Amino acid sequence: MTLDKQSIPAYLQRKKLLPKPVPLTIETLGDGQKNLVFYVAGPEQRWIVKQALSRAAVPERWWLDRARIFAERQCIERLAAVLPPALVPQVILEDRTDFVLVTTAPADTASLWEDELAGGRIDLQIAVQCGEHLATVHSATANDRDIKTQFKDTKAFSQLRVEPYHGQVAQVFPDLRKIVDGQARHLLREGRALVLGDLRPRNVWVQAGQLFLVDFATAHYGSPSFDLAFYATDMCLKAMQNSSQKAAYLEAINVFWHAYFAKAAYEKIKETEQLAVRDLGCLLLAATDGRQPAQLPDAHTADLSRRIAQSLLFTELLKIEEITEFINRTLIDG
């Protein structure tokens, strides 16, 4: 069964989440390429209904393991033990037959941070909170045997991140294959903590300065550097897509980075910072030449992005301000 707006009311009744027919407001969230996600609101309920797809809704064949939805449930439950309760959803239903997860939704007055940024409202305090909360997750789960056992499966992370990003980049840039493959191996083999795998503004809801995090389908026991680089990549792309506010987007990387390292406490943390810079280079290359390229303003900006990304793979810069200044200067000078 594949869910849609028409079938959701009957589905929720069948699962006994609705005792009787009630008026519902149902909105589609996301692009629907890898998951079907719906915001469902009734007189007394507010849920997010998510169904994992087995094939990405793109022209090429891209098969996905639907069991990732169950890892998402496990991640939500683990996060509830280390983060403030209001920060993560609560699991209402796990349907192991149709690969559906129903969770509580953010408040109806909450807005996506992605939408706030698109409207020109760049609140750096939200970036600080993201960095602090991420540091809490990594520190609380670092070298935890139970976490390592529970989240040892990296299949979804490989299918949704490593293969379409690193794998594709290694084919497009054969001269960079050695370093890109090395980063991929590091991400898949050198686990240290619970990695969220999808921390970016499109998965952060905001209400009165408070956050609500969603989407943990690629969560796994892995390298913390990926979460840092993934967030930074998204902000770099926003800087390239919105040149008039690029300095603010780059500053949102700086404050996030500093908040994270001010609070993170686990072994080899300096190595995480060094690896994150190379991960950022790989992910930026994937943004132009991966399986799903980002939309950049023009070919010239895309070439600048490639140049920045390749420089980050070999840079000796370590301070995040130096890195974002290099990015800013490259975008200005062309």
Image (cartoon, rainbow, N blue to C red):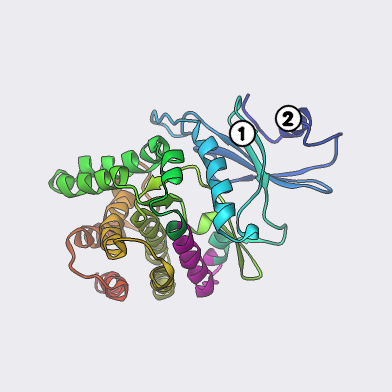
Instruction: Give the image location of residue 82, x and y in percent.
Output: 55, 57
Specify whether residue 120 is painted magenta. yes
Q: Are marks 2 and 1 in contact (CB under 8 Å)?
A: yes
Q: Is residue 190 left or right of residue 16?
A: left
Q: Amino acid at mark 2?
A: Tyr
Task: Name the residue nearer the viewer: 285 or 240.
Answer: 285
The answer to which of marks 2 and 1 sits earlier in the sequence is 2
Residue 123's mark?
Answer: none
Q: Marks 2 and 1, how far apart in space?
A: 11 Å
Q: Residues within 10 Å of mark 2 (few under 14, many from 20)?
A: some
Asked where in the image residue 17 lies, by quadrant, the reply is top right
Range shown magenta: 117-137
Residue under the point 53% across and 69% down: 126
Relative to residue 68, is residue 261 depicted above or below? below
Residue under the point 52% across and 55% down: 202
Q: Is residue 258 left or right of residue 170?
A: right
Specify whether residue 5 is painted magenta. no
Task: Name the residue nearer the viewer: 238 or 199.
Answer: 199
Instruction: Give the image location of residue 5, x and y in percent.
Output: 70, 36
Residue of label 2: 11
Residue of label 1: 100
Instruction: Give the image location of residue 66, x and y in percent.
Output: 50, 31
Instruction: Give the image location of residue 125, x and y in percent.
Output: 53, 74
